[in-house]
Image: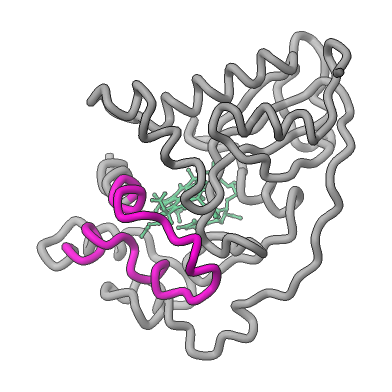
Amino acid sequence: MRQAGTATYAQLCAQAATVGLACRGGFHPEDGDALPEVSGHPARTVVLLGFTGREQWPVFAASPESGDGAPHALDRWSRRVVGELASRFSAGAVYPFTGPPWWPFQRWAHRAERLYASPLGVLMHAEYGQWHAYRGALLLPYAVELPALKVWPNPCASCDEQPCVAACPAGALAGGRYAPEVCRDHVSSEHGSACRTQGCLARYACPVAATHRYTAAQAAFHLGAFIAARG
Ligand code: B12
């Protein structure tokens, strides 16, 4: 039984699972993180929340937001379910999609779990490879003990063929770093139908954690959002 205003990491994760989210590790903030206060108290623990592989997608797909036809369905769903979770734990919440300026979720992710940047820019996870993402972060005004970082080797360091780089039909990874405009021009053009229908071909070419690859519907949703974000 938890006391009001406190929680263990296991309790947080169990509750997160009930709303369709996975705990993605956490960290104890420092002054430089400049996080908002939670009901007048400094945030003492940040727990990242998100999707791992294709596991949580069906919960979002069955939600009212997914079916209402209005824009930004996944962001609106994330606000609702992360917000619900925050109120259960007397926490604040921040999101990866409010910006610019953006909250630095990938920098935080490196503090929460041992991850490695792939050539695409997407972080590699020990179990899920590139197939994971962030939907929000809980800001807890109390200290929560967090799991130790799991040590594992960077799979990209021993991947000489780099099939991800070779598979990009636009050559958006050719310069040694991801060129988002080159990618988006191609994906939005008549030549980009394979990316649009099958998902990012570079990401799918990665052999790591292939069993966790997104489903066609999940991939198509993200590519659609990426094209729509052109502004
Ligand atoms: C802006 C942005 C983009 C821009 C990148 C523009 C650029 N290069 O400048 C665009 C729109 C191109 C983009 C595309 C994608 N993105 Co993006 N993006 C973001 C966002 C909203 C902000 C990043 C940022 O500027 N942060 C500010 C700095 C200060 O914070 P940071 O943590 O230190 O940021 C680092 C990263 O941005 C990284 N980086 C630089 N360039 C790129 C390019 C890509 C593709 C990625 C993934 C990271 C990355 O370097 C920064 C410095 O350390 C983040 C969410 C977030 N709040 O972090 C998602 C995020 C980084 N994106 C993500 C993903 C998955 C993608 C896509 C692969 C899929 C998608 N969302 O459709 C696509 C790639 C397109 C494809 N072919 O599929 C995920 C990465 C998850 C992971 N496993 O690592 C994030 C964390 C969103 C999430 N909800 O989980 N993205």
Q: Is residue 39 above or below residue 46?
A: above
Q: Quadrant of the C terminus?
A: top left
Write the residue at 51% across / 53% down: 53
Q: Which residues are magenta?
A: 193-222
Q: Is residue 133 above or below residue 62?
A: below
Residue 172 in picture, x, y percent from top left: 35, 71
Say which of 182 and 49 sits in front.
Answer: 49
Q: Is residue 121 above or below residue 4?
A: below
Residue 144 in picture, x, y percent from top left: 86, 32
Q: Is residue 207 magenta?
A: yes
Q: Is residue 56 magenta?
A: no
Q: Is residue 71 above or below residue 38?
A: below
Q: Is residue 40 left or right of residue 115?
A: right
Write the residue at 49% across / 28% down: 78
Main SS of the magenta segment?
A: helix
Residue 8 in picture, x, y percent from top left: 84, 30
